[in-house]
Image (spheres, helix red, strand yellow):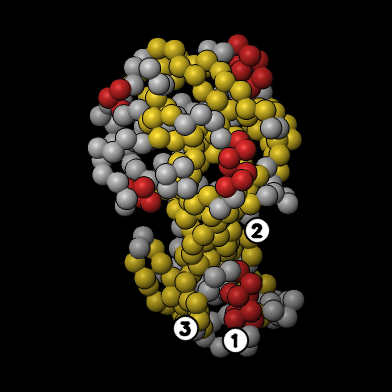
Amino acid sequence: MKKKFIPIFLLVICLFMYVNVLGIENKLYSQTVNASTKRYVNPIGRTVGLKLYTNGVLVVGMSEIDGQDGNKYMPYNGSGIKEGDMIKEINGKEISNTQELINIVNSSNGNEISIKYERNGELIYTSIIPVKGKDENYMIGLWVRDAAAGIGTLTYYEEATKTFAALGHGITDVDTGNLLNISNGELVTSQIVSIVKGVKGRAGEIRGIIDNGQKIGEIESNTSIGVYGIVTNLDFINSIKQEELEVAKRNEIKTGEATIICELENDKVERYQINIKKIYKNSKDNKSMLIEITDEKLLSKTGGIIPRNEWYSNCTK
């Protein structure tokens, strides 16, 4: 009997306490098939890099400005803008990155600028008067971000739709804690640099780099249960994909021994044993089962479950 694939969406190296099994479908796939259609995917379990670009610029902090007159200013006071808001336009011009915001603010010469920003899906309009700082540049006192990057696990590739799923959790901003609202992104190859073994009271960590990574695909959505997109580099995917398996439905999963695949050394994906301890059949979120790492080889390398590395990004005031 052909084995069925349980998409255990896990952090960086395929290890995560709770997993989602067909809880929320990939939107790209659900547009083309109905719920009764059997799905077949290629398990991957490989560490990859992800580069994401926001839909506007995200406000991640606020600070005072040292004015040329020696006084401190907070131009954003009274504007209503808060951390977590996404600036979409300034003076009617669409903003797609931090440099565009800097250029417009600095060219204002201290004149009031109009700002359109988004909060929880609602568009809000406000205005701020920039202040000239000691460095001769005009500023509004907001720390903003337009991109994020890090490494994670490429969970599976679906040949029927040329789509992929990664991570199994949403990418949130490290400062605001909110799900990152992205406009697009890239899935790229990565290199594992080191693994810090987890011990009691301190989680382990996997460290890697994505500089000069080979592009694998386009990221199209960042959701609470994972990152999805389209594979553009089929030659690469074909060189790393596993045997295609039918996806198991939630009610087909049983407790007991199971196998996961993950990459702990560059270009070396291996299989490890786990124990499915409990199944949450009525779960509405990304918590469908509780697993225990039982493989001694895996435990000796990682100490158990390793969370993803911190996402990094550039901030600009």
Q: Position of residue 151 (x, y in %)?
A: 61, 42
Residue at 64%, 79% in the rendered image: 103
Q: Is residue 258 left or right of residue 304?
A: left
Q: Amino acid at mark 2?
A: Asn
Rounded to the nearest whole Å, what is the CA distance between mark 3 and mark 1? 13 Å
Instruction: Please tell me the numbered disc located at residue 108.
Output: 1
In the image, what residue occupies the spot 39% across and 24% down? Answer: 4
Q: Which mark is residue 92?
A: 3
**Residues marked 3 and 1 touching at CB (< 8 Å):** no
Instruction: Tell me the SS state at disc 2.
Output: loop
Callout 3, which amino acid? Answer: Gly
Q: Nearer the viewer, mark 3 or mark 1?
A: 3
Query: N-terminal of the two: label 2 or label 1?
Result: 1
Whether tag 3 and tag 2 are in contact, CB under 8 A, the answer is no
Give 23 or 247, whichever is nearer the viewer.
247
Dot 1: what SS?
loop
Q: Earlier in the sequence, mark 3 or mark 2?
A: 3
- Checking the image for residue 314, the label placed there is 2
Q: Nearer the viewer, residue 119 or 47?
A: 47
At 39% from the left and 30% from the top, the residue drawn is: 246
Neighbour tally class for label 3: few under 14, some 14-19, many 20 plus, Cα within 10 Å: few
Query: In the rendered image of this protein, does residue 157 appear above or below residue 149?
Result: above
Identify the secondary structure beneath mark 3: loop
Residue 259, horizontal then vertical, whole percent: 49, 19
Q: Which mark is residue 214?
A: none
User: Which mark is first along the chain, 1 or 3?
Assistant: 3
Q: Position of residue 61 (x, y in %)?
A: 55, 60
Most foreground residue, 213 or 292: 213
102 in relation to 309, above or below: below
Q: CA distance from mark 2 to mark 1?
A: 23 Å
